[in-house]
Amino acid sequence: MLKITFMGAGSTVFARNVIGDCMCSATLREAEFALYDIDGQRLQESAEILGAMNETLGGHSKITTFLGVEKRKDALRGASFVVNAIQVGLYDPCTIIDFEVPKKYGLRQTIGDTLGIGGIMRALRTIPVMDDFAKDMEEVCPDAWFLNYTNPMAMLSGYMQRYTGVKTVGLCHSVQVCSEGLLKKLDMEDKLEGRKELIAGINHMGWLLEIQDRDGNDLYPEIRRRAREKNANEKHDDMVRFEYIDKFGYYCTESSEHNSEYNMFYIKSKYPELIDRYNIPLDEYPRRCVNQIEGWAKERDQLRESHQLDHKRSHEYASYIMESIMTGDPYKIGGNVLNTGGLIENLPHDACVEVPCLVDGRGVNPCRVGRLPVQCAAMNMTNINVQLLTIEAAVTKKKEHIYQAAMLDPHTGSELDIDTIIKMVDDLIATHGDWLPKYC
């Protein structure tokens, strides 16, 4: 029997989407879905919900649960695919720490899960756990594909790709919806059908390098005109990325609330008016976490009453990747892979890049892109510098590399002086306590 293991299955909503997608596939629906988590209550809730979904969709699947580190190898043993959606430290306490400690030093964030000091700390507490996963996988399911959905995507996937023997691809939601969302926001829905596009760069800052209509006409001139006009005349929720189009020439994959903190331009204590001008939602991720926790509790109770849960296959890549590898039928994704051989020529070979990949019976096969526009590569490098230094810190356990990652982070470095950055990092390390390994 095909076995698909879900690490962090207590992330019930996401587990429901990915496993529900698999249950909608004739190729995958008779699999064993092994649910693993370290939180018994969350694991049980997921098993209950997925069981109801399985019954609603025909009862083809087998669902098993594995609680705690001592059961981890059993969860992984014999798996063909491992989906990773863990959040080490959860919202409380670790996300709260990631936001509240930097505030004491005058550093504000929006999301804090990909870059910046929040992304750095999240990576440092997650990499050791994923390294343990890798050791177990190399022993009990050495041929499995590891499909990573956990952020910070480039740091975690890059670590797995460079320092473990596990076949790893990082998967995000933003590539699939990038051009569709852009065209809809600019009232260009008539250009959606049959459009052609090329997206490449790094996770959360992949560039929409080319976009054409069904007849091969370049849509960017009209996109640039409309984006400039929209930013000049109305306040909306994507102003930062529309500014990217105007100043850097290209739109990028992840939302404006994310990208507002990936650079040195928008969140500046000396220019507080920029927050309102670009409609930047500071502290957005903590608000989102609280709302999601409350929303899930209500949804869970409703599902328990109905005992019915249908599912429509989503745009998430995971089930399509599994299906393609199992059947050999080709499928194209935007995947996060190591820049081996210079898939993107003007980015480092040890960076984790996001490029088109062909999936088939041989697995995930990245496609060469060539050179990015110089300004796009330069923007990517400000993020890659932080990613590589954070991975270096995780590997060497040297605190100096955490300092360096924070100093070179574009938002942190533009707001704080070096001495303050070091004090803030020391404070974060001390406050995290046992959530982090020891650094010298």
Image (spheres, rainbow, N blue to C red):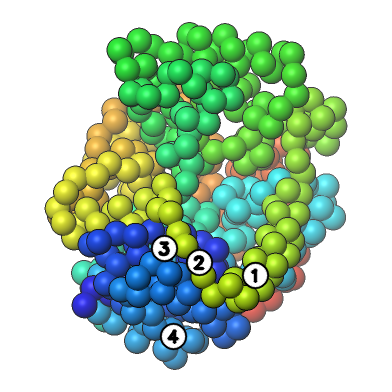
Position of residue 260 relative to residue 151, above or below, is above
Residue 402 position (above or below residue 333): below
Spatial CA distance of label 4 from label 2 is 23 Å
Name the outermost residue toward the bottom: 70
Residue type highlighted by circle 3: Gly
Q: Earlier in the sequence, mark 4 or mark 2?
A: 4
How many other residues sit within 10 Å of disc 3, few (<14), some (14-19) or many (≥20)? Answer: many
Residue kind at label 4, given as amino acid type: Phe
Q: Which residue is mark 4?
A: 66
Look at 29% across and 30% down and name the residue there.
Answer: 369
In the rendered image of this protein, does residue 21 appear above or below residue 3? Answer: above
Label 1 residue SS: helix
At mark 3, the secondary structure is helix
Where is mark 1, residue-wise?
302
- Mark sitting earlier along the chain (4/1): 4
- Disc 3: which residue: 20
Mark 2 residue element = loop
